[in-house]
Image: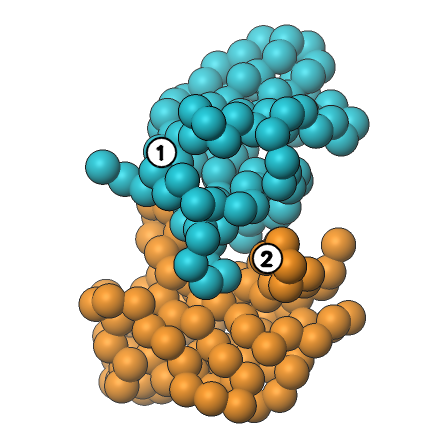
């Protein structure tokens, strides 16, 4: 299967600071990537679809000014959590489809964000 | 009604037995179906993909799809303690390439 990496794997920050998370497809190109958030004991929640060379598409209820997404190349998408607050503490996971005809998505290892 | 539904479990099975997981979906135009395994604190790992009606086997895993009944299942044969995890059913709908996930079924394999 395809390999997707994320960096950092965990981050602790103070309230009010911004945090950037990187998602890379290592052995394939991805014109689209997806960002999810997962709270403890809950299922994945899709936050947004990252599109290479164009604006991201956000799911209903997700603040686009708070969660900035940039898909700068065919292998890199970034999620920036701006002015983070404790309620933003969560497990953030990206995914990328490997074969567009089937939309077989592979997930990165995730980034655990803790906002103090 | 949720778009993709799974029994949350926990599904407790003895080691060596067959674990049977079920998933129903509401979008009749759905094209692709996936099972992911997620260990606690880790990200989901793709274990099975199925696109046409019938059975698909891969090692100890068998996925079954019935589009007429809007039903997809996963069988885990010879269950091992290492199979203890949450299993997520995901469906690619007719519109776009977003996956819709069920809430997951927690499986506990007891030695």
Residue pictured at 37% horizontal, 84% vertical = A68
Can you say which quadrant of the picture contains the C terminus of chain A? bottom left
* Residue A85 in the image, given as x and y percentages of width and height: 24, 75
Which is nearer the eye, A112 or B93? Answer: B93
Q: For this view, does A5 lie left or right of residue A79?
A: right
Q: Colour of chain B?
A: cyan
Q: Secondary structure at mark 2?
A: loop
Which is nearer the eye, A18 or B69? Answer: B69
Q: Which mark is residue A103?
A: 2
Please report, as a chain letter, where disc 2 is located.
A
Residue pictured at 44% horizontal, 45% vertical = B29
Please report, as a chain letter, where disc 1 is located.
B
Residue A84: which quarter of the image? Answer: bottom left
Q: For this view, does B4 lie left or right of residue B64?
A: left
Q: Is residue A108 visible?
A: no
Q: Which mark is residue B5?
A: 1
Which is nearer the eye, A96 or B93? Answer: B93
Q: Residues within 10 Å of mark 1 (few under 14, many from 20)?
A: many
User: Is the residue A38 above or below the residue B88 in the image?
Assistant: below
* Residue A61 in the image, given as x and y percentages of width and height: 21, 67
Residue pictured at 59% horizontal, 65% vertical = A96
Q: Is residue A110 visible?
A: yes
Can you say which quadrant of the picture contains the N terminus of chain A? bottom right
Circles 2, 1 touching at the beta carbon (< 8 Å) = no
Applied colour scheme: by chain
Q: Give the chain letter for orange.
A: A
């Amino acid at each position: 299967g395809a390999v997707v990496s994320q960096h950092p794997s965990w981050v602790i920050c103070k309230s009010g600071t911004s945090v950037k998370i990187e998602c890379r497809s290592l052995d394939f190109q991805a014109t689209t990537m997806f960002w999810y958030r997962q709270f403890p004991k809950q299922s994945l929640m899709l936050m947004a679809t990252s599109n290479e060379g164009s604006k991201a598409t956000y799911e209903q209820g997700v603040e686009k000014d708070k969660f900035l997404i940039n898909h700068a190349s065919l292998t890199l998408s970034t999620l920036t959590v701006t002015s983070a607050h404790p309620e933003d503490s969560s497990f953030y996971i990206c995914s990328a489809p490997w074969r567009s005809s089937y939309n077989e998505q592979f997930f990165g290892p995730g980034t655990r964000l803790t906002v103090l | 009604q949720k778009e993709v539904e799974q029994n949350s479990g926990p599904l407790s099975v003895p080691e060596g037995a067959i674990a049977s997981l079920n998933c129903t979906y509401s979008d009749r135009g759905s094209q692709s179906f996936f099972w992911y395994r997620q260990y606690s604190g880790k990200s989901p790992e793709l274990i099975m993909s199925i696109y046409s009606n019938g059975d698909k086997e891969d090692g100890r895993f068998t996925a079954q799809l019935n589009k007429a009944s809007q039903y997809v299942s996963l069988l885990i044969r010879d269950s091992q303690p290492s199979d203890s995890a949450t299993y997520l059913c995901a469906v690619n709908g007719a519109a776009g390439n977003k996956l819709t996930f069920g809430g997951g079924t927690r499986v506990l394999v007891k030695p």
